[in-house]
Image (cartoon, helix red, strand yellow):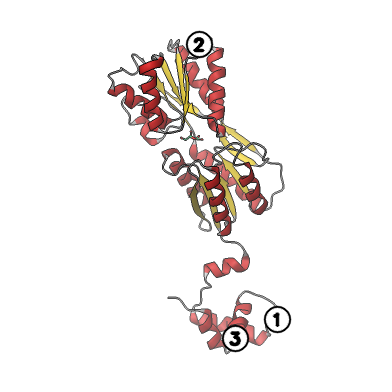
Amino acid sequence: MGVRIHEVAVRAGVSVATASRALSGQRGVRAENRDRVLAAARELDYEPNAVAAALRSRVTHTIGMIVPRISNPFFATLVEAVEGRLQDGRRSLLLAGSHYDPEVERQQVRSLLDRRVDALVAVPCHQHHSTETIGNAAERVPVTQLDLRVDGFHGDWVGVDNEAGVFQVVDHLAALGAHSLAFVGSHPSDSSAQARLDGYERAAARHAHHSGPVLLGDFSKEWGRQAAEKLMDSEGLPDAVVCGNDTIALGVLAALIERGVRVPEEVMVTGFDDIPYAELSRPALTTVRQPQERLAAEAVRLLTSVMEGEQRPPQRIAVAPDLLVRGSTKR
Ligand code: RIB
């Protein structure tokens, strides 16, 4: 165990309160006492306790981050990218998950703030029901929204242009001759699910496709499987299934292949995100790549600028995504 302030006080011949005031540079300590305390601290190699120092200075060099689902590889990669950007030797990350539940999110954010994080990177799980939580947090610390954002809060946000990503997918499928499409996505409770659904409807209408069934559940492989079963059993298989994210698409692919449906010959399948497993599926998944390193870098840059006191209007940065064409659509 390291040297405690009590030992410094004893060596300097002063009370612990005087030693503490002298070490934290407060006024009201006689010059000779301060000199004795500083000399004792040097001789004993005293290192102030980080938590106690943080309580005094109110700066913890800790950034909070909340994401909807830690186990989704998209968010796991995003967290790692943010953490990498913070590793300038001074700041560390405190992570929490909301499980797509605005009430859990509210409690988790409060708990991060109670632990005195200096700032918050938030991926809010609901476009409406998370607004109050984000607004309240922003009254206490700088907040940057990453990937998802809420309605009715004018703060910094960085994410991809979701609609543009879905347009790229639909254009690609149309160029390959797909006439009938189905969309398997998440209920539009969060801003990305909403933008991808809107983008799909607009893009399909632009190509005068029968946009076909729109099936909405959540961002999980289980939902992907279930939706594919539904398409095979009752809706009828379209030329292509456009999925709201990669985990849904991997569930769709698995269910189709298990039933002997040939991908891409009979049905093409696309995802969104480019999680690490997307290229490992067979066939490998055509998907929209979100540049997560860039998203994380922009988010940390915005957050840092506010923490350093820069006065500027809130920024919204929509980064262009890329379409990665792989075996699930190549004919
Ligand atoms: O995979 C989870 C999805 O939810 C991602 O596409 C991300 O953009 C999000 O909001």
Which one is earlier in the sequence, the residue at label 1 or at label 3?
A: 3
Image point 55% across, 43% down: which residue? 102
Q: CA distance from mark 2 to mark 3?
A: 81 Å
Q: Measured along the vertical axis of the image, is residue 303 above or below residue 318?
A: below
Q: Quadrant of residue 260?
A: top left
Q: Quadrant of the C terminus?
A: top left
Residue type pointed to by label 3 = Ser
Q: CA distance from mark 1 to mark 2?
A: 78 Å
Question: Badge 3, how many Cα within 10 Å: few under 14, some, many 20+?
Answer: some
Whether pointer 1 and pointer 3 mark residues with C-beta atoms closer than 8 Å, the reply is: no
Which one is earlier in the sequence, the residue at label 2 or at label 3?
A: 3
Instruction: Name the residue that disc number 3 marks.
Output: 15
Q: CA distance from mark 1 to mark 3?
A: 13 Å
Q: Secondary structure at mark 3?
A: loop
Residue type pointed to by label 1 = Gly
Residue type pointed to by label 2 = His
Question: Badge 2, how many Cα within 10 Å: few under 14, some, many 20+?
Answer: some
List the single residue furthest toward the bottom.
Answer: 13
Q: Is residue 259 visible?
A: yes
Question: Badge 1, how many Cα within 10 Å: few under 14, some, many 20+?
Answer: few
Q: Secondary structure at mark 2?
A: loop
Which one is earlier in the sequence, the residue at label 1 or at label 2?
A: 1
Instruction: Name the residue that disc number 1 marks.
Output: 28
